[in-house]
Amino acid sequence: MVQRAAAATFAPTKRVAPARPQGIAEELVGQPDGSFRVRDAERGTLGQPNGIYNFVRVRGQRRDDGSIYVSPKLPHAHLAAGRPVLYAGTAKLESGKLDWWSNFSGTYQPIAEFRAQASLPVDKFVTWQKLQLGGTSMQRGMLGERRLSAAPQRPREERAAAPKDEKKGQEPAARTGQPSGPASVVGKARLR
């Protein structure tokens, strides 16, 4: 005997669009006076950039006519949108004036020696290492300041007052992390 499967009906499901990163890539446009404006991708209007932006310079029809796209929120790969990238990094603009720019990009990791490919003023260039060490003023804590800190040490008086192991003239095993006493001798003998 053959059983027939009953017809299954499924409720229609909503299609959910994949999550898009927040932000829009805008084109960075140089002005004759040396300042910059950003061209809104949707309206085509020019605005004055303020803050820290990720940027990519992508190749145009010819290598010399590449465009620079910026966004304060989009990662570098989204700014490039699959186009060949000539240079990528981070830039700080205040009222349209370029304060500094760097090769800080985790996606592309451009080499500092190739900075001329960015087509930005080379005298405003700062390496990403200098940024990470806090050598350049930052906004929004984007890169964070990292400083080396020495391991905390006990004050001299406290070290002098610490009890010493009478046999070896060292601190007790509880402080040094070394086993002590007859059990440790047996343990060492087993290891040999």
Image: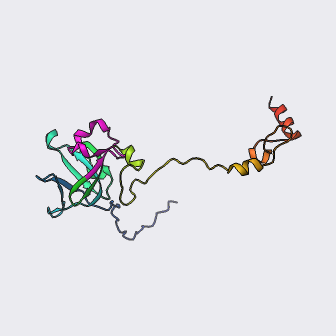
**Horizontal and vertical percent position of residue 108:** 33, 43
Specify the farthest residue to the front.
157
Quarter of image, res 97? bottom left
**Horizontal and vertical percent position of residue 153:** 64, 49
**Horizontal and vertical percent position of residue 102:** 31, 46
Q: Residue at x 32, y 62 (%)?
A: 22
Specify the farthest residue to the bottom.
11
Q: Residue at x 25, y 54 (%)?
A: 70
Front residue (pair 4, 155): 155
Horizontal side, residue 146 vs residue 38: left or right: right
**Horizontal and vertical percent position of residue 98:** 23, 53
Whether residue 119 appears in magenta in the rendering, the answer is yes
Q: Residue at x 50, y 59 (%)?
A: 2
Quarter of image, res 192? top right
Whether residue 124 appears in magenta in the rendering, the answer is yes
Front residue (pair 25, 177): 177
Q: Is residue 37 above or below residue 178?
A: below
Horizontal side, residue 37 vs residue 6: left or right: left
Specify the farthest residue to the right.
182
Q: Which residues are magenta?
A: 99-126
Horizontal side, residue 98 vs residue 184: left or right: left
Horizontal side, residue 56 vs residue 18: left or right: left
Front residue (pair 145, 188): 145
Quarter of image, res 184? top right
Q: Is residue 190 above or below residue 141?
A: above
